[in-house]
Image (tube, helix red, strand yellow):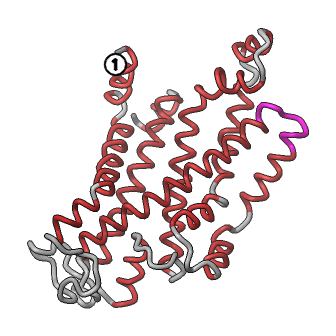
Amino acid sequence: MKLLRALGRVFRGNWKLTSGLVLLVLLVAAAVCSPLIASMVGKGQDPVAIAAYEKWLVPSPAHWLGTDQYGRDVFAMTIGALAVSLKVGAIAGVISTIAGVVMAFVAGYKGGAVDGVLSTFTDMVLVVPSFPLLIALSAYTKDVGIVEVALMLAAFSWPFAARTIRANVLSLRSRPYVELAKVTKFRDLEVIAYELLPNMLPYIGVGFASSALGAIFALVGLEVIGLGPGETIDLGKIIFSAINTGAMTLGAWPMFVAPILLLTLLFAALNLINIGLEEVYNPRLRGVTGA
């Protein structure tokens, strides 16, 4: 009960964190319910199957966002694409955050030569122009699945989390309670797990959100230039299709606007959460940001 009351005070006192979480929950809920939404729209048939309906139908009560060049319902397709984009972002975010956390804790806690080697490697990966490399890799991996694409994106998105977390680990490792844990014969893993990790959870959360968002937008960038994965439909592929078919000139503007709106809402939600967490755990920012 005390934890719930504490969380309630945090949310009531920070509208940015609350608004971001509510918006993110709504987007995730829509993505999770995409099969149900598709069945409701299709009324017994697959609304995103080719030639399910007439081509280029305008928005109407039967088709809220109209249909595309293949006769697929744009609303059902967009919600399904949101689910795919979130899945890629979640997988890439988890993998890159785990890699970044391990690298940061080992480098920051051990220090010395270990820190020098790992920090240098992290900086080298960080300055590598990742998008051209992703383009080159995607050109040779057109038939890969969602998991493979997420792994490819995660390989370039972990350094940011690693640098942010390492800097805080360097600050925390000299705190009195960490020194006390060492004196009481705690092993390194115990010190990290019981003393450092709980204090780093907000920063880990920020690192995850940044990595996931970066992976989603990187995938959109690849799709827009025609180098996305196989037959998987994500938000970027819908935008690519809308551009190539001239959907705006044909009156099918929702095909272009809807995925961009969802990406904008996702960007706003994750950034509001990041700003809210920073204000909660760094009170000096409240006066600066006007919270």
Tell me, yes or no, if residue 248 can be seen here.
no
Percent across and percent down for residue 185 are 79, 12
Task: Give the quadrant of the N terminus.
Answer: top left
Name of the residue lying farthest toward the left:
61
Percent across and percent down for residue 202 are 53, 34
> What is the quadrant of residue 241 in the picture?
bottom left
Q: Is residue 129 left or right of residue 42?
A: right
Number of numbered markers? 1
Q: Residue at x 63, y 46 (%)?
A: 161
Q: Residue at x 27, y 84 (%)?
A: 68
Percent across and percent down for residue 10 are 38, 26
Q: Residue at x 44, y 74 (%)?
A: 232
Q: Nearer the viewer, residue 249 or 44?
A: 44
Secondary structure predominantly adopted by residues drawn in magenta: helix
Q: Is residue 114 magenta?
A: yes
**Looking at the image, residue 59 lies above or below residue 283:** below
Q: Is residue 110 magenta?
A: yes
Q: Which region shows up in magenta?
A: 108-116
Task: Give the quadrant of the C terminus.
Answer: top left
Circle 1 SS class: helix
Q: Which residue is mark 1?
A: 5
Tell me, yes or no, if residue 20 can be seen here.
yes
Label 1 packing within 10 angstroms: few (<14), some (14-19), many (20+): few
> What is the quadrant of residue 85 in the picture?
bottom left
Q: Nearer the viewer, residue 145 or 128?
A: 145
The disc labelled 1 sits on which kind of residue? Arg
Q: Residue at x 33, y 66 (%)?
A: 80
Percent across and percent down for residue 21 are 36, 42
